[in-house]
């Protein structure tokens, strides 16, 4: 039996890619720029969401990261933005949606 020659590159399976996209979307949850959400630790404003796996790995220092969010702790006035990779959970609570943030920015 003969096999077709390989190009040396893996061909992505669209079903697998779509499944990964859905998993990543569920992990990120409603976090997008402008959102404010609360966890059991503090409350954070989302400044950016990085969906490029290579950049997310660099930001988080994790070999398997698929995404990262850049947030700022709003309870600390001197807080510097930092990267997180924690998944959205049922105990996280949305304080301000992105729609509200976009409307406020347009004024």
Image (tube, grey):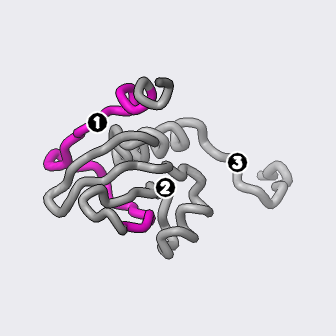
Residue at 35%, 48% in the rendered image? 27
Residue at 51%, 37% in the rendered image? 18
Mark 2 secondary-structure assignment: loop
The residue at which mark 2 appears reads as: 67
Q: Where in the figure is residue 26, as x and y percent of width and height?
A: 35, 42
Closer to the chain start, of discs 3 and 1, is 3
Give me the C-alpha separation between circle 3 and circle 1.
Answer: 40 Å
The residue at which mark 3 appears reads as: 11
Which portion, as a residue range, is magenta? 79-102
Q: Where in the figure is residue 56, as x and y percent of width and height?
A: 54, 62
- Point out the frontmost of discs 3 and 1: 1
Q: Where in the figure is residue 5, as x and y percent of width and height?
A: 85, 53
Question: Which quadrant of the view contains residue 35?
Answer: top left
The residue at which mark 1 appears reads as: 96
Neighbours of disc 2 within 10 Å: few (<14), some (14-19), many (20+): many
Give me the C-alpha separation between circle 1 and circle 2.
Answer: 22 Å
Closer to the chain start, of discs 3 and 2, is 3
């Amino acid at each position: 039996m003969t096999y077709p020659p390989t190009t040396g590159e893996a061909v992505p399976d669209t079903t697998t890619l779509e499944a990964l996209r859905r998993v990543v979307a569920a992990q990120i949850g409603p976090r997008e720029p402008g959102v404010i959400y609360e966890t059991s630790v503090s409350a954070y404003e989302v400044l950016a969401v990085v969906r490029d796996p290579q950049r997310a790995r660099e930001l988080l220092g994790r070999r398997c990261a698929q995404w990262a969010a850049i947030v700022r702790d709003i309870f600390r006035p001197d807080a510097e933005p930092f990267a997180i990779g924690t998944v959205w959970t049922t105990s996280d609570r949305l304080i301000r949606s992105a729609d509200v943030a976009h409307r406020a920015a347009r004024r």
